[in-house]
Image (cartoon, rainbow, N blue to C red):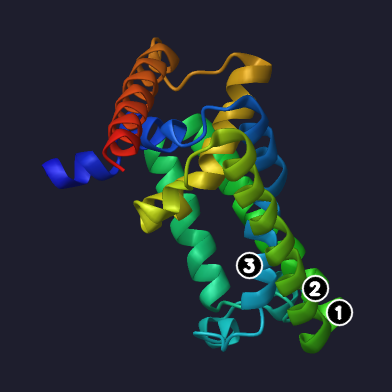
Amino acid sequence: MSRMMGLLDLEKHFAFYGAYHSNPINIVIHIIFVWPIVFTALLLLHSTTPIFDPSQLGVSQSLTLDGVLRFNLGFIFTLVYALFYICLDKKSGFVAALMCFSCWVGSSLLAVQLGPSLSFKVGLASQLLCWTGQFVGHGMFEKRAPALLDNLVQAFLMAPFFVLLEVLQSVFGYEPYPGFQARVNAKVESDVKEWRAKKQQKNKVT
């Protein structure tokens, strides 16, 4: 039970990711590039083998846009991310889930229009561009390695939700619950201070 609560501890997840993204310019860079990474990752996954044929369950082909929507690995990732975000916070999680499924539908439509070969090229080029932009943000502005180098799974899971919450908080003043942002900011500040102290100590030794 405690492990499950830890997995769904939004404050802990957000503070962890926020500690690696405290620079305003780096945050903007991630807001620009993170969701395109989700979209183009689903574009690349569109060609994976379907897990099942919806017609076998009596689902009309028209409901899957004449077979455009494939219940494959891309759909599984979309479903997992959507459910995880809703479990973290119902309101913002629902928005994130809608965005996840919008990316799945949109990338599926684009994949059919482009064809397998061009979809792969467009998806790969976009991934390289977006990831390069994020690494530049960390190297030039954050001055700290990306979160994925310390916790790969958590970084990949939280990145889309993190940038969404940043926008909701900045534009609409949204908080999952009262005091959330203040508590997260305190944890982020503490983590950043600890990291800087360790870095300074390491530089002295070397």
Q: Is residue 140 visible?
A: yes
Q: Residue furthest right?
A: 113
**Do the CB atoms of the residues marked 2 and 3 lie less than 8 Å apart?**
no
Task: Return the mark for residue 41.
Answer: 3
**Do the CB atoms of the residues marked 1 and 2 lie less than 8 Å apart?**
yes
Task: Return the mark for residue 48.
Answer: none
Q: Is 198 left, or right, of 102 in this rendering?
A: left
Between discs 1 and 2, the one toward the N terminus: 1
Give, as a three-letter code, the residue at label 2. Val
Would you name the residue on which mark 2 appears?
Answer: 122
Q: Depth check: 49 or 41 in front?
A: 41
Label 1 – label 2 distance at C-alpha = 9 Å
Give, as a three-letter code, the residue at label 3. Ala
Between discs 2 and 3, the one toward the N terminus: 3
Q: Depth check: 196 or 31 in front?
A: 196
Give the SS element for disc 1: helix
Would you name the residue on which mark 1 appears?
Answer: 114
What crowding class fits label 1: few (fewer than 14 Cα within 10 Å), some (14-19), or many (20 or more)?
some
Give percent across and percent down for residue 129.
74, 60
Q: Is residue 192 above or below residue 132?
A: above
Between discs 3 and 1, the one toward the N terminus: 3
Give, as a three-letter code, the residue at label 1. Leu
Give the SS element for disc 2: helix
